[in-house]
């Protein structure tokens, strides 16, 4: 999403310590869209990605603004804001945004784990096969079988993490886990969303107070009140291992600038810490760019693993006297592939249109 949106890329990298203040971004956003309501700020973990702000126009349209490296001006409006949302909803619940969709998706974690265990049992001494090239003189079935095993052992650590964390996401729907967080709203009501005279300087004072209340936290999300019962809400990351960045939270009264509540990731109960760690591992959020790059590589290997398995099936169904291609043999393999897959894709498209339009 970042690569296809040039406005999200900075001409020169800017480290977190050198980023403009959130107050500077607030004033720049108000200057760019004076009639809009500035609601949220996003600060990425990568030095080469621009800060962004979500604003709501008078006709209730959402716009995501990108800022220059010094935050003095808005460089453009990001048209790809919904791409991540669409992919996330497809991955989490097949666009249903319903518990049934989540359970349907996460149930396959148990299937994946079963494949991993049985694969390690049938592939004897798999720990020695990381660099064993498949034979090319034994026919396509043997060659694709070797490729399949090779991709499997390479992606084994990744798939174990995905299956275990996915199984937890399934089981937690049947377990009551109270999640600790700073109370974001409803603590104080005002006549207006923002007090008179609220500007970037006021927001900077609030951020400084939050920094004093939660030392060591690098805030990467700030929400400004949009309704009279809302408060200034800040979230960020610290050096707690495998912690969710959103679990370090501070809430501040926008009128008195009083710190109302503080929640730190290191103070969360053990079950919540474990859940945070599984989320970080599942989505590859650990280790910054290095972690995400590893997960892209492993995800690609997992996709190739599926393709190799399909090619094994195609080679197995090939008759000696036919020149039918692998794709056609896969397509004609069964009624499920000819009818089931197309119906599944059409159903996904219909749900997506209903949910996202």
Image: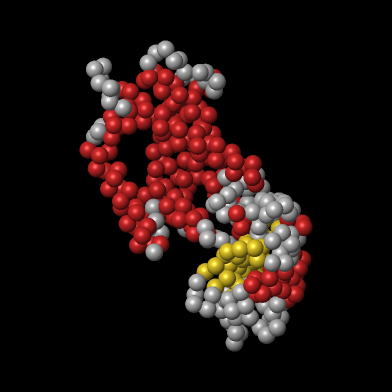
Left or right relative to 130: residue 214: right
The quarter of the picture where residue 247 lies is bottom right
Please tell me which residue lies in front, 296 or 117: 296
Image height check: is 159 above or below 118?
Answer: below
Image height check: is 39 above or below 142?
Answer: below
> Taking the image as drawn, is residue 258 in sight?
no
Report the residue at 34% width, 52% height from top: 348
- What is the x, y in percent for residue 157? 54, 34
Report the residue at 69% width, 61% height from top: 68
Image height check: is 234 above or below 187?
Answer: above
The quarter of the picture where residue 211 lies is bottom right
- What is the x, y in percent for residue 156? 51, 32
Please tell me which residue lies in front, 56 or 184: 56
- What is the x, y in percent for residue 110? 41, 40
> Taking the image as drawn, is residue 299 in sight?
yes
- What is the x, y in percent for residue 15? 74, 53
The quarter of the picture where residue 264 lies is bottom right
Report the residue at 55% width, 67% height from top: 63
How many tags in the picture? Answer: 0
Residue at the outermost bottom position = 191
Left or right relative to 13: residue 160: left
Please tell me which residue lies in front, 84 or 33: 33
Report the residue at 49% width, 75% height from top: 60
Quadrant in which the C terminus appears: bottom left
Left or right relative to 191: residue 160: left
């Amino acid at each position: 999403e970042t690569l296809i949106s040039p406005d999200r890329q900075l001409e020169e990298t800017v480290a977190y310590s050198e980023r403009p203040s959130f107050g500077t971004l607030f004033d720049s956003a108000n200057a760019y869209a004076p009639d809009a309501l500035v609601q949220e700020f996003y600060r990425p973990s990568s030095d080469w990605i621009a800060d962004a702000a979500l604003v709501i126009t008078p006709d209730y349209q959402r716009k995501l603004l990108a800022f220059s490296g010094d935050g003095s001006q808005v460089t453009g409006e990001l048209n790809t804001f919904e791409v991540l949302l669409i992919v996330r909803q497809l991955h989490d619940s097949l666009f249903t945004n319903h518990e049934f969709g989540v359970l349907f998706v996460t149930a396959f974690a148990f299937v994946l784990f079963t494949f991993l265990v049985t694969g390690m049992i049938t592939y004897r001494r798999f720990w020695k096969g990381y660099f064993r090239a498949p034979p090319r003189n034994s026919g396509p079935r043997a060659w694709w079988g070797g490729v399949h095993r090779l991709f499997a052992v390479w992606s084994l650590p990744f798939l174990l993490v995905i299956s275990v964390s996915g199984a937890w996401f399934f089981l937690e729907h049947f377990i009551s886990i109270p999640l600790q967080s700073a109370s974001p709203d409803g603590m104080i009501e005002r006549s207006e969303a923002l007090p008179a005279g609220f500007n970037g300087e006021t927001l900077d004072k609030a951020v400084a107070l939050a920094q004093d209340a939660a030392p060591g936290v690098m805030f990467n999300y700030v929400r400004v009140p949009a309704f009279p019962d809302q408060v200034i809400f800040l979230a960020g990351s610290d050096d707690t291992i495998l912690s969710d960045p959103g679990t370090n939270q501070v809430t501040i009264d926008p009128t008195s600038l009083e710190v109302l509540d503080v929640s730190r990731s290191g103070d969360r109960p053990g079950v919540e810490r474990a859940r945070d760690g599984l989320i970080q591992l599942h989505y590859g959020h650990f280790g910054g760019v290095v972690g995400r790059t590893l997960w892209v590589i492993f995800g690609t290997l997992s996709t190739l693993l599926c393709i190799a398995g399909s090619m094994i099936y195609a080679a197995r169904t090939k008759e000696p006297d036919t020149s039918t291609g692998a794709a056609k043999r896969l397509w004609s393999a069964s009624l499920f592939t000819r009818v089931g897959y197309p119906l599944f894709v059409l159903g996904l498209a219909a749900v997506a249109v209903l949910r996202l339009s």
